[in-house]
Amino acid sequence: MDYGVHYMKKIIIDTDIGVDFDDVLALMTGIALQNKGVIGLDGVSVGTARENASACASAVCDYYGFKTDIPVFHSEKILCDNTNVYATAVAEKFNGVNEEDTVRFLRRKLAAAEDKVTFACIGPLSAISKLIDSEGDDISPLKGNDLISEKVERFYCMAGNLSYIHPELYTGKFTYVPEWNVIQDIKAAQNFINKVRVPVTLVPFEVGGKVLSGATLPENSLAGFAIRHFYKINYKEFPGCFLRQSWDPITVALASGLDIAEVSENGTITIADDGKTDFIPGKGNHSYAFSKYDEKTVADMLDSLYAEFAEKK
């Protein structure tokens, strides 16, 4: 498959792993693209204070062949951090965790980066907001936002709902309501979008909302385990269903340069106090992604990446 990438990007994935299993699929997407030489996966950070989230991400990365230290987000929990669908269950399959704080980890990664880094943010923006507000330290004298301006090329953030802009794509399927990642920590999302100086591409809810992927993964894989565990816990809401929307893997794929969605012209994204997102075209360093292909085409593209791990035991 031609992935439509013209140069290797350095990617950091910031995940809130442990509730929905599309985070596991997103990590698999990043690792598969690294294995294919499409990206350099420079790190995985955890932006959730959920118990065992870091160990869960470490277990997934280790299982799929990406050996890396993953930090712990030492922060007060937001409401969703108290929900633990599979983080502990997966973490039990892995021994050891890096206790470095997420913000310090990200400062270290950025300070050491020789080339500019692209972020794929697939959870609430709590850790990234704290990174922006971080002070200079022994790692770098630069404040967080200055370090970001110097070392980050772009943020791709799975956040928001802009389906009202392209109603022809989503008629009857979505309503304009606040999106989950945003409403978990509205103040962090507002702080990020109002202060960040580098380009930001929002990958809103509707882009992955109809793309169902992951069902072909074997049950004895960690991804398969997380999928089955998710549906076991949520069986009343998802009876007999083993597919899931692909919000997070699409975000990682787009951040990696894959031709998987369209990106709008530049403008300004705003986030209201109730979490609703809006886009004002024109002046600004923000943009948003919207669907380019039908949902089956995108699902097939993602499933072709997961297929690399189908035989993994």
Image: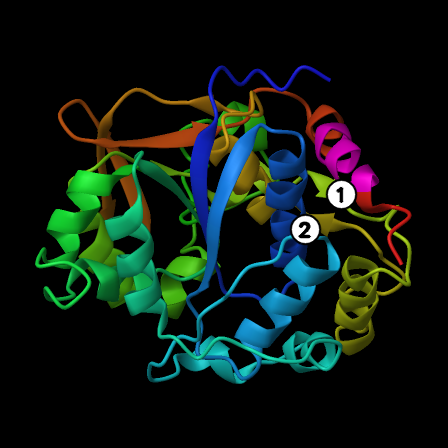
Q: Residue at x 77, y 41 (%)?
A: 306
* Residue 206 place in picture, x, y as percent: 53, 40
Front-most of residues 143 and 23: 143
* Residue 231 place in picture, x, y as percent: 80, 68
Magenta span of residues: 300-308
Give the quadrant of the C terminus: bottom right
Q: Residue at x 79, y 63 (%)?
A: 222
Front-most of residues 37 and 259: 37
Element class at badge 2: helix
Q: Is residue 10 left or right of residue 113?
A: right
Residue placed under numbered mark 1 in the picture: 213
Q: Is residue 39 left or right of residue 305?
A: left
Density class for disc 2 (Cα within 10 Å; few <14, some 14-19, many ≥20) is: many
Q: Is residue 28 above or below residue 206?
A: below
The first of marks 2 and 1 along the sequence is 2
The answer to whether residue 295 is seen in the rendering is yes
Q: Are marks 2 and 1 in contact (CB under 8 Å)?
A: yes
Give the quadrant of the N terminus: top right
Give the numbered dot on residue 25. 2
Give the numbered dot on residue 179. none
Which mark is nearer the camera, 2 or 1? 2
Q: Is residue 66 left or right of residue 152?
A: right
Front-most of residues 177 and 125: 125
Q: Residue at x 78, y 47 (%)?
A: 214
Mark pair 2, 1: CA separation: 9 Å
